[in-house]
Image (cartoon, helix red, strand yellow):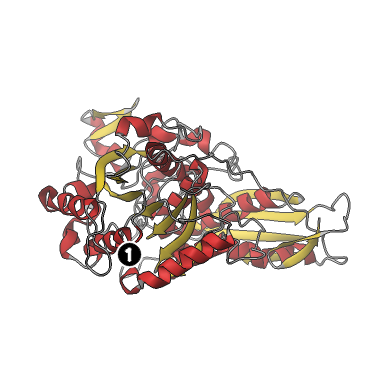
Amino acid sequence: MNERPTAVSLFSGLGGLDIGAHLAGVETLVCVDNNHDAAETLRINSTAHTETPQFGVARFDWQVIEQDIRTLEPQYLCGEVEASASRTATSDPPVDLVIGGPPCQSFSRSNEGGRTGTDSDLGQLYERYETILGDFQPEGFVFENVVGILSSKGGEDIKTIKTALSAPRDAAGNQPEHSYNIVSMKLDAAEFGVPQSRERVFILGVREDIGTPPSKEDVLRTNHPEGWHAAGAALADFTVDAGVAPYQNAIRSKYAGFLPRIPEGANYQHFSDRRYEDGEYVERSEAELAEKEWDWRSRHWNYLLKLDPDRPAWTLQAQPGSTVGPFHWRSRPLAFVEQLRLMTIPCWYEVAGDSTAIQRQIGNAVPPYLGCAVVGALADALGIHREPRHLDTPERYTIAPAPEQHGINKRNTADSPWNEIAELIPQLRSHDSVELEATREAIPRLVDVLELLQFWVENVVIDRVETKAGSRPEPSQSRVYRADTPSPSRIVARISLSAPDSVGATSRRIAGQVTPD
């Protein structure tokens, strides 16, 4: 058994389960994912691939394989695992656990029209998980997926998958010497310090010659970081737009004007036959029915859904439409850094890709605090000695302004906040100040930039943040705006650098610029 327990991660995504394993004291040696943006996220945050990351905080050592698992040769995976184990001074045998979960689209209840279960190519990817399980024969495994897998094909799919994982065959089709004792359970992330209600199904396996897997009660008793119990507490330190005038139209919809009028914790149903009052929906009086816009329960629950700061957030989505919540109680979409916090993913963890790719990765992730409890309970059931860890907040940077600065530079903010900051730092150094502007759905990206700058840069100064009304949208063939739709909200911020107190002899790299410590 390894002195430091290790894992191979399949279908890793942005690495949420792997961060959780790290917190539990289990180190991932190799991550496998075929999505380029997810693989790039894993590389950015790994010292195995990034000598000097953009913000200098690669905290993990995993090797990343960007490849479709269906074409991944077992010998190649074994070689990468052995190389990673050697590089990180891990003793033989190199793998204690296999962890991960295949894409959920085939099983998700939100995909009712295309919910094909194990009849589709995606739904059959569990077979590749089974093969790798058979090849490595680890002491235990964690298989994760959405709750919809329990009801897919009337419950037959979960039975099929559990049968396969209990007696996995290797790449040659042979059944190895040992089978697995397995258990499945549904867990809500909110029970583990995650400020978000997010249910997931886990299948846990322990090799039959070793013992039995942990029960749900064992997992619930396993230590995990303390976390938060409500969204408001989790986001309390994200305040860059807390003092601005309320957003009146921060989403692209003809119903945008309704969002500011929906109470915290409510959704579109506040404007149905009922209204939201003191935490519940009550029947409207005849006089109040004039405000009715929708029939009761005529749309999806998360339509214009607004967070309640006193409760855990509702499940974050991977591909939300413009009217799909949960929205911030400030009546705007959530910023990425806020979503990372609601997932218990560290705010210093950089996510690669454009805005669509970043949202997809966050919305598909396993919250690390949940992963920590699951992996920790499994390791304990195996009798593996582990040392739980925590993730320190990185040191902040000081950026020296250029000797000569010139006027005010203006720019719009719309895409990846990490890319935006990479371009923004040189402009901050060469100008007296930089004015940032964003309209409607781009507002959260500007919030991201401001929050990340405050997190990373000690001498950044946010001189001004204010909201303004933009010009009214023009009707088009694809979108007709209501007469009462407010003008699009616009946020403007001016930022600058204060002079550093001292210039040290060492330098650090941030956003491609070598800057004094």
Q: Is residue 325 left or right of residue 57?
A: left
Residue in the foreground of this view, choosing between 245 and 336: 336
Residue in the foreground of this view, choosing between 183 and 2: 2
Please state the horizontal and vertical placement of residue 19, each as a whole percent of the image: 49, 49
Location of the C terminus (image quadrant): bottom right
Dot 1: what SS?
loop
Q: Residue at x 19, y 46 (%)?
A: 150
User: Which quadrant would residue 98 be assigned to in this image?
Assistant: bottom left
- Amino acid type at image mark 1: Arg
Question: Is 228 rendered above or below residue 33?
Answer: above
Question: Is 247 rendered above or below residue 277?
Answer: below
Q: Local crowd at mark 1 within 10 Å, few (<14), some, or many (≥20)? A: few
Please state the horizontal and vertical placement of residue 107, each as a whole percent of the image: 22, 55
User: Which quadrant would residue 251 be assigned to in this image?
Assistant: bottom left
Q: Residue at x 42, y 64 (%)?
A: 32
Q: Which residue is mark 1?
A: 479
Residue in the foreground of this view, choosing between 410 and 428: 428
Please state the horizontal and vertical placement of residue 225, each as a whole percent of the image: 51, 35
Please state the horizontal and vertical placement of residue 394, each as a whole percent of the image: 67, 48
